[in-house]
Image (tube, rainbow, N blue to C red):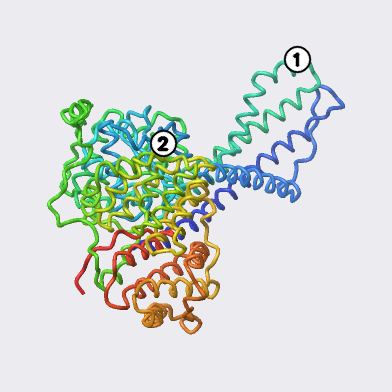
Amino acid sequence: MDFFEAQAAARKRTSRLVVLFILAVLGTIFAAYAAGLLIVGQAERYDPGREGISRYSERPSLWQPKLFAGVALATLAVVGLASLFKWKQFSAGGSVVARNLGGREIDSRTTDFNERRLLNVVEEMAIAAGTPVPAVYILDDEPGLNAFAAGLTTSDAVVAVTRGTLDKLSRDELQGVIGHEFSHILNGDMRLNMRLTSLLFGILILGIIGRSIIWSLRFGGARRSRNNKGGGGGIALVVAAGIALLIIGYVGYFFGRLIQAAVSRQREFLADASAVQFTRNPAGIAGALKKIGGYALGSSMNSTKSAEIGHFFFAQAFRSRFGGLWATHPPLPERIRAIDPGFDGTFFNPPEVVNVAEQSFVSAGLAPARPAPSNRAAPGIPPILSMAAARLAPATVGTLTADQIADAHDLLESIPTRLRDAAHDPTEAPLLLFALLLDPDPGVHEKQRHIISGRRTGATTAPATLDEFEALLQPLPAALHLPLVQLSLPALRPLSSTALEAFLSTLDALVHADKRVSTFEFALQKLVTHTMKVARNPSHAAEQYHSFNAVTSEIATVLSILSRAATSDPAFAPEAFAAGASQLKLIEPQLRYIEGTETQFAHLNAALDKLAAASFPIRQRTIIAAAHVVSADGQVRITEAELLRAISAALDCPMPPLRATAD
């Protein structure tokens, strides 16, 4: 299943979830109506005019339209508002979930061996998949072995692991767990998980209200009853209402948990299989599952909030009741046998600390936090790629393979340690990105240096530091520039709104210092601005356009600008445009090549912003068309490849670094 098929499947699961939720709400409404009939009947039996004496009226009708309408509207209002409230909480992205469970974000400059190892694994997978590097959290108070990914988009995604996972798994096992979580990131599962949690909260809120009513009466009800002898009937009705709400809420909660389990279980098998495909190492994830089975605490979580998001986790986070009906994950033996058919049912208990010798090495200040490079060919993208490499690129969107991870590992190892450390430092990462934009032309270069020194951006602006970065970047292959930008993105997320605005303003001034925009400058600026924009407001990343006709002019703009950037011969640009337009049969007659005087990169930026709100099929065909444009002349330069990747990233379709292939 490719990225776009996975997104379509996620949308189908969302539709199924909505249907199940509606059924659960209807069940809650009928349960509330039944409780309402009982309360109304009880109220009619009490005659306030004759204290202490009850009278019996006629048995009330089982169908009372006004009562049903009132109960239905009240239930829908409470459930709907509660779900919207929870969704609003999640609108800030995955970090909200991690912090709500007591998570601590790992400082990207950490020297702790286990934390550094975890960051390395996450960075390798993000670079390999072409996604922004997620923020990484540790649940320090959780000794069990578990992990989760959360977020609304790849730009606000977080990966969180428990202290037990960090300390008790080997690197291969940790890589298997992180591969499992990246499957959820790439397959659209995270947004579905957030929606499911919001809906479950809406169902549960009635039970919470009922519990609050009973709790308040526990302390004040008896005293009020003694002071107001005539109010006993009213108190009884309030207590009855509270109990009814409590029962109704937990009836809905019961079915909500069934929905949670039904949506979650099958996806875990798929994520396990994806982790094996990503790492090409079944023993890694199988070993992690076996340690969970053998460890006394297993994957259980201490936090009482874990059940609310139990479907997020790598393994069962809470004890399942009702014979496993609430289990959000398949039994461990089933998961292990799906990976290792020869599993004999024997689990093993993990040691309390792994890699003791390596950790001692780290504590002495000598630790290489990254594993040794593999014996693969030189990393990175060659200066010229073949036509096949570019035209196969759309098929790699949202994929992650063992070869890509190995390439990413070698690529990251090729980046000088000083630059990689700077990319992790919130005070130096902005300056590193500025250094990537410095122009070789002396006049433009001097102007750019003046811009940097004259603006307050929150970056370390010492000329010596900028000189150091510039010297290290000069011999660095161009194929490593965009991955270096990806590495820097997590360090930019903590910037305040004011600091981020100042940084982006300086970035824009550097790009336009020579009054023109190169393909790399556009790619860098678009990648940074889009990622930061979505990370700050991920809830707005929603589909608005479902027809190609609604975005025809934007697609024409993208293909026109790309066709001129992809060739040194202006006369060939219309032919390159036609190669791309031919991949969009539905609107090919309406697509018109736009002359260079009519468009520039500013128009491309606006077009991509609108296309980012289009449906996935539209984005998919646009990326395929773009790939045919850049390969129309039979070869693809590194700048063209990176521009194609930037366009794909701007459409929230992560594309891995392109690899050379034979035509």
Mark 2 highlights which residue? Answer: 321
Q: Position of residue 286 (x, y in %)?
A: 22, 44
How many residues crowd around disc 1 within 10 Å: few (fewer than 14), some, or many (20 or more)? few
What SS does tag 2 mark? loop
The answer to whether 449 appears left or right of 505 in the picture is left
Q: Quadrant of residue 401?
A: bottom left
Quadrant for the C terminus, please.
Answer: bottom left
Q: Position of residue 149 (x, y in %)?
A: 39, 44
Q: Position of residue 515 (x, y in %)?
A: 47, 63
As rendered, which of 574 and 328 lies closer to the eye?
574
Q: CA distance from mark 1 to mark 2?
A: 41 Å
Residue type for callout 1: Arg
- Please, is residue 512 above or below residue 210 in the view? below
As rendered, which of 213 and 655 lies closer to the eye?
655
Mark 1 highlights which residue? Answer: 226
How many residues crowd around disc 2 within 10 Å: few (fewer than 14), some, or many (20 or more)? few
